[in-house]
Image (cartoon, helix red, strand yellow):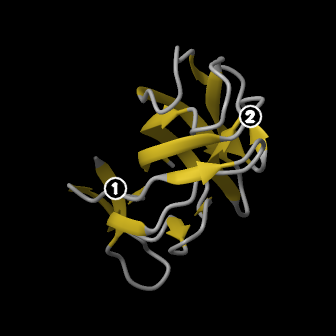
Amino acid sequence: MLLLHNQGAGNRPRFTLKKGFEFMIEVINTAVQTVGVGQSVVYNTTTAKGGCAERHRVGSALITLLKPGRYLVGFSGNIAIPTGGTAAEISLGITQDGEVIAGSRMRVTPSAVENYFNVSTQHYVDVYGGCCVTVGVENTSGQTIEVYDPNLTVVRVCG
Protein backbone atom coordinates (compact mmCIF):
# COMPACT_ATOMS: atom_id res chain seq x y z
CA MET A 1 0.00 0.00 0.00
CA LEU A 2 1.20 3.53 -0.71
CA LEU A 3 0.77 6.55 1.52
CA LEU A 4 1.36 10.22 0.80
CA HIS A 5 3.67 11.63 3.47
CA ASN A 6 4.20 15.35 4.13
CA GLN A 7 7.94 16.12 4.42
CA GLY A 8 7.77 19.87 3.82
CA ALA A 9 8.18 22.77 6.20
CA GLY A 10 6.23 25.99 6.54
CA ASN A 11 3.84 26.76 3.67
CA ARG A 12 5.60 24.54 1.10
CA PRO A 13 4.55 20.94 1.74
CA ARG A 14 6.31 18.24 -0.25
CA PHE A 15 4.73 14.81 -0.67
CA THR A 16 6.44 11.50 -1.31
CA LEU A 17 5.14 7.94 -1.48
CA LYS A 18 5.96 5.55 1.34
CA LYS A 19 5.56 1.82 0.78
CA GLY A 20 4.33 -0.70 3.32
CA PHE A 21 2.28 1.58 5.59
CA GLU A 22 -1.15 0.09 6.24
CA PHE A 23 -4.18 1.26 8.14
CA MET A 24 -5.80 -1.97 9.30
CA ILE A 25 -7.22 -3.87 12.23
CA GLU A 26 -8.09 -7.52 12.88
CA VAL A 27 -10.24 -8.64 15.81
CA ILE A 28 -11.19 -12.17 16.91
CA ASN A 29 -12.91 -14.12 19.66
CA THR A 30 -11.67 -17.64 20.40
CA ALA A 31 -14.55 -18.61 22.69
CA VAL A 32 -17.88 -19.96 21.46
CA GLN A 33 -20.48 -17.26 21.96
CA THR A 34 -24.26 -17.33 21.85
CA VAL A 35 -25.63 -14.46 19.77
CA GLY A 36 -29.31 -13.60 20.04
CA VAL A 37 -31.54 -12.47 17.19
CA GLY A 38 -30.52 -8.96 16.10
CA GLN A 39 -27.48 -8.98 18.38
CA SER A 40 -23.88 -8.49 17.28
CA VAL A 41 -20.84 -10.78 17.45
CA VAL A 42 -18.39 -9.64 20.17
CA TYR A 43 -14.59 -9.63 19.79
CA ASN A 44 -12.29 -10.09 22.81
CA THR A 45 -8.86 -9.75 21.15
CA THR A 46 -7.24 -7.33 18.73
CA THR A 47 -4.69 -9.51 16.92
CA ALA A 48 -3.26 -6.91 14.54
CA LYS A 49 -3.46 -3.14 14.26
CA GLY A 50 -1.58 -0.66 12.12
CA GLY A 51 -2.13 3.07 11.90
CA CYS A 52 -4.81 5.14 13.56
CA ALA A 53 -7.78 4.99 11.16
CA GLU A 54 -9.66 2.23 13.04
CA ARG A 55 -10.55 1.76 16.70
CA HIS A 56 -11.87 -1.22 18.70
CA ARG A 57 -12.48 -1.61 22.43
CA VAL A 58 -11.81 -5.15 23.68
CA GLY A 59 -15.14 -6.84 24.44
CA SER A 60 -17.02 -4.66 21.97
CA ALA A 61 -18.89 -5.78 18.86
CA LEU A 62 -18.00 -2.69 16.81
CA ILE A 63 -15.01 -1.24 14.99
CA THR A 64 -15.09 2.53 14.48
CA LEU A 65 -13.60 3.84 11.23
CA LEU A 66 -12.18 7.26 12.07
CA LYS A 67 -10.77 8.67 8.85
CA PRO A 68 -12.31 9.37 5.45
CA GLY A 69 -11.62 6.76 2.80
CA ARG A 70 -12.67 3.39 1.44
CA TYR A 71 -12.29 0.36 3.71
CA LEU A 72 -12.46 -3.33 2.85
CA VAL A 73 -14.35 -5.14 5.64
CA GLY A 74 -14.00 -8.92 5.74
CA PHE A 75 -15.57 -11.47 8.08
CA SER A 76 -15.19 -15.21 8.54
CA GLY A 77 -16.42 -17.49 11.29
CA ASN A 78 -18.17 -20.73 12.13
CA ILE A 79 -21.89 -20.71 12.95
CA ALA A 80 -24.30 -23.32 14.28
CA ILE A 81 -27.70 -23.75 15.90
CA PRO A 82 -27.27 -24.27 19.66
CA THR A 83 -28.71 -27.22 21.56
CA GLY A 84 -32.46 -26.66 21.95
CA GLY A 85 -32.71 -24.74 18.66
CA THR A 86 -34.54 -25.78 15.51
CA ALA A 87 -32.78 -26.97 12.35
CA ALA A 88 -33.42 -24.11 9.90
CA GLU A 89 -31.55 -21.46 7.96
CA ILE A 90 -29.26 -19.26 10.06
CA SER A 91 -27.37 -16.16 8.97
CA LEU A 92 -25.06 -13.26 9.82
CA GLY A 93 -24.61 -9.92 8.05
CA ILE A 94 -22.04 -7.12 8.14
CA THR A 95 -23.48 -3.90 9.55
CA GLN A 96 -22.63 -0.28 8.83
CA ASP A 97 -23.87 2.16 11.48
CA GLY A 98 -26.25 -0.52 12.78
CA GLU A 99 -27.84 -1.50 9.45
CA VAL A 100 -27.05 -4.71 7.59
CA ILE A 101 -25.22 -3.97 4.32
CA ALA A 102 -27.21 -5.26 1.33
CA GLY A 103 -25.56 -8.36 -0.11
CA SER A 104 -23.50 -9.11 3.00
CA ARG A 105 -25.70 -11.87 4.47
CA MET A 106 -23.95 -15.21 4.99
CA ARG A 107 -26.53 -18.03 5.10
CA VAL A 108 -26.40 -21.75 5.85
CA THR A 109 -29.01 -24.41 6.64
CA PRO A 110 -27.69 -26.98 9.13
CA SER A 111 -29.56 -30.28 9.28
CA ALA A 112 -28.94 -30.62 13.03
CA VAL A 113 -27.98 -28.57 16.09
CA GLU A 114 -24.29 -28.09 16.91
CA ASN A 115 -23.47 -28.67 13.22
CA TYR A 116 -20.96 -25.87 12.41
CA PHE A 117 -20.58 -24.23 9.00
CA ASN A 118 -17.93 -21.70 7.96
CA VAL A 119 -19.26 -18.46 6.50
CA SER A 120 -17.40 -15.47 5.06
CA THR A 121 -17.89 -12.28 3.07
CA GLN A 122 -16.22 -8.97 2.38
CA HIS A 123 -17.58 -5.57 1.38
CA TYR A 124 -16.38 -2.03 0.82
CA VAL A 125 -17.46 0.66 3.27
CA ASP A 126 -16.96 4.35 2.51
CA VAL A 127 -16.31 7.00 5.17
CA TYR A 128 -16.92 10.50 3.88
CA GLY A 129 -15.49 13.79 5.18
CA GLY A 130 -15.55 14.42 8.87
CA CYS A 131 -15.92 11.29 10.94
CA CYS A 132 -16.92 8.22 11.61
CA VAL A 133 -18.62 4.96 10.67
CA THR A 134 -19.06 1.82 12.79
CA VAL A 135 -18.99 -1.71 11.40
CA GLY A 136 -19.87 -5.04 13.00
CA VAL A 137 -21.54 -8.39 12.32
CA GLU A 138 -25.14 -9.11 13.35
CA ASN A 139 -27.23 -12.26 13.75
CA THR A 140 -29.86 -11.87 11.01
CA SER A 141 -31.44 -15.28 11.72
CA GLY A 142 -34.84 -15.88 13.20
CA GLN A 143 -33.26 -17.67 16.18
CA THR A 144 -30.26 -17.57 18.51
CA ILE A 145 -27.04 -18.96 17.03
CA GLU A 146 -23.58 -19.99 18.20
CA VAL A 147 -20.53 -18.31 16.68
CA TYR A 148 -17.07 -19.82 16.99
CA ASP A 149 -13.74 -18.24 15.93
CA PRO A 150 -15.17 -15.06 14.39
CA ASN A 151 -12.58 -12.92 12.61
CA LEU A 152 -13.32 -9.36 11.49
CA THR A 153 -10.69 -7.53 9.43
CA VAL A 154 -10.84 -3.93 8.22
CA VAL A 155 -8.24 -2.47 5.84
CA ARG A 156 -8.24 1.13 4.62
CA VAL A 157 -7.59 0.72 0.90
CA CYS A 158 -8.05 4.28 -0.35
CA GLY A 159 -8.24 7.74 1.12
Determine the residue positioned at 27% across, 59% down.
21
Q: For marks 2 and 1, give the one nearer the viewer.
A: 2
Q: How far apart in space, not on screen, are marks 2 and 1 (Cα)?
A: 44 Å
Task: Classify mark 2: residues with Cα within 10 Å, few (<14), some (14-19) or many (20+).
Answer: some
Tell me which corner region of the image, top left, top right, bottom left or bottom right, holds residue 57: bottom right
Mark number, residue 3: 1
Image check: 123 left or right of 14?
right
User: Is 97 drawn above or below residue 120 in the view shown?
Assistant: below
Image check: 134 left or right of 56?
right
| Residue 93 percent location from the top left of the image | 64, 33
Tell me which corner region of the image, top left, top right, bottom left or bottom right, holds residue 137: top right
Which residue occupies the foreground of this view, 31 or 10? 31
- Looking at the picture, which amino acid does disc 1 mark? Leu
- Looking at the picture, which amino acid does disc 2 mark? Gln
Residue found farthest to the front? 84
Determine the residue positioned at 50% across, 41% down.
73
Image check: 12 left or right of 2?
right
Q: Is residue 156 visible?
A: no
Which residue occupies the foreground of this view, 144 or 77? 144
| Residue 90 percent location from the top left of the image | 63, 25
Q: Which residue is mark 2?
A: 143
